[in-house]
């Protein structure tokens, strides 16, 4: 008897019940947390302006997701079709909405890309590139804004002297430094020393409990290095 394919196993794992249950639970939690706000809005009258604002918000969401589809299509270097790129982004967004913020949808995005036919090393590299683009936007936006405004304008003036004022600034500086470090690690792993990254990962998979997957590491790292070489060979216009 033939073994079920990975695609069949994935479809079985993503049954309708398993998809609908967390969605319903999330809606119940949202209602519980915001039910007082709903009660306060009982006298709200839906107007034409409200309809236009809702349509504008939906249009911006459409533009964002369309840009994500184009980005994943370009980063796949032609390996994904437009339909596969669309499916990847929609499932990625769905996974991000359901998973805790600490986990995020990136781990699931790797599996989604692998399901679409991309090897594991290439899938991880593609997801890391998308993460790097998001991180670099923040890394570059902060100093760019500082050319036109002072650092004090980043924080509300009416919180001065409050107990959380110093905490907010500490979180901002700490978060920015952490984002810079994460960006530097991704750049190093993908573009500067992919072989060194492979050696580190190989050492990690020698740890007891992970060693049972060590036989796959060489193949993963070979795919990783190929993906790195393909990305490093792209022109400035590709990244623009």
Image: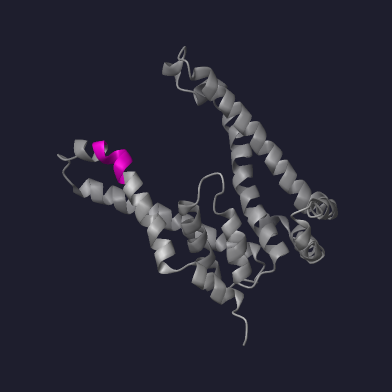
In the image, residue 154 lies at what x, y percent? Answer: 51, 26
Left or right of 55 on screen, residue 181: right
In the image, residue 89 lies at what x, y percent? Answer: 52, 61
Q: Is residue 150 visible?
A: no
- Going by the picture, which residue comes out furthest to the bottom? 1
Q: Residue at x 65, y 48 (%)?
A: 132
- Going by the picture, which residue comes out furthest to the top? 161
Which image quadrant for residue 177? top right
Left or right of 21 on screen, residue 49: left
Q: Magenta includes 7?
A: no
Q: Observer-nearest residue: 65 or 207?
A: 207
Magenta portion: prevailing SS class: helix
Type of colouring: one colour
201 to 76, vertically: above or below? above
In the image, residue 238 lies at what x, y percent? Answer: 67, 59
Q: Residue at x 50, y 47 (%)?
A: 100
- Where are the magenta residues, as a range? 31-36
Q: Observer-nearest residue: 240 or 43?
A: 43
In the image, residue 78 lies at what x, y percent? Answer: 65, 71
Q: Magenta includes 35?
A: yes
Q: Quadrant of the N terminus?
A: bottom right
Q: Residue at x 39, y 59 (%)?
A: 21
Q: Residue at x 18, y 47 (%)?
A: 47
4 to 56, vertically: above or below? below
Left or right of 233 on screen, residue 112: left
Q: Is residue 37 visible?
A: yes
Total count of labels: 0
């Amino acid at each position: 008897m033939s073994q079920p394919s990975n695609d069949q196993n994935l479809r079985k794992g993503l049954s309708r019940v398993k998809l609908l249950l967390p969605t319903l639970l999330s809606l119940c939690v949202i209602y519980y947390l915001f039910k007082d706000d709903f009660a306060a809005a009982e006298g709200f009258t839906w107007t034409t302006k409200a309809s236009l604002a809702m349509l504008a918000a939906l249009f911006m969401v459409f533009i964002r997701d369309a840009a994500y589809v184009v980005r994943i299509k370009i980063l796949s270097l032609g390996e994904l079709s437009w339909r596969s790129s669309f499916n990847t982004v929609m499932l990625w967004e769905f996974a991000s909405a359901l998973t805790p913020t600490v986990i995020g949808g990136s781990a699931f995005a790797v599996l989604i890309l692998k399901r679409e036919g991309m090897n594991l090393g290439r899938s991880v590299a593609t997801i890391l590139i998308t993460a790097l683009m998001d991180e670099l936007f923040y890394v570059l936006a902060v100093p760019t804004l500082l050319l036109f405004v002072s650092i004090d304008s980043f924080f509300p003036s009416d919180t001065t002297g409050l107990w959380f004022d110093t905490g907010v600034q500490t979180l901002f500086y700490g978060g920015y430094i952490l984002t810079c470090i994460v960006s530097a690690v991704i750049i190093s792993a993908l573009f500067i020393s992919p072989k060194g990254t492979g050696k580190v990962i190989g050492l990690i998979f020698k740890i007891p409990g992970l060693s049972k997957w060590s036989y796959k590491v060489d193949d993963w790292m070979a795919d990783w290095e190929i993906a790195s070489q393909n990305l490093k060979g792209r022109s400035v216009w590709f990244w623009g």
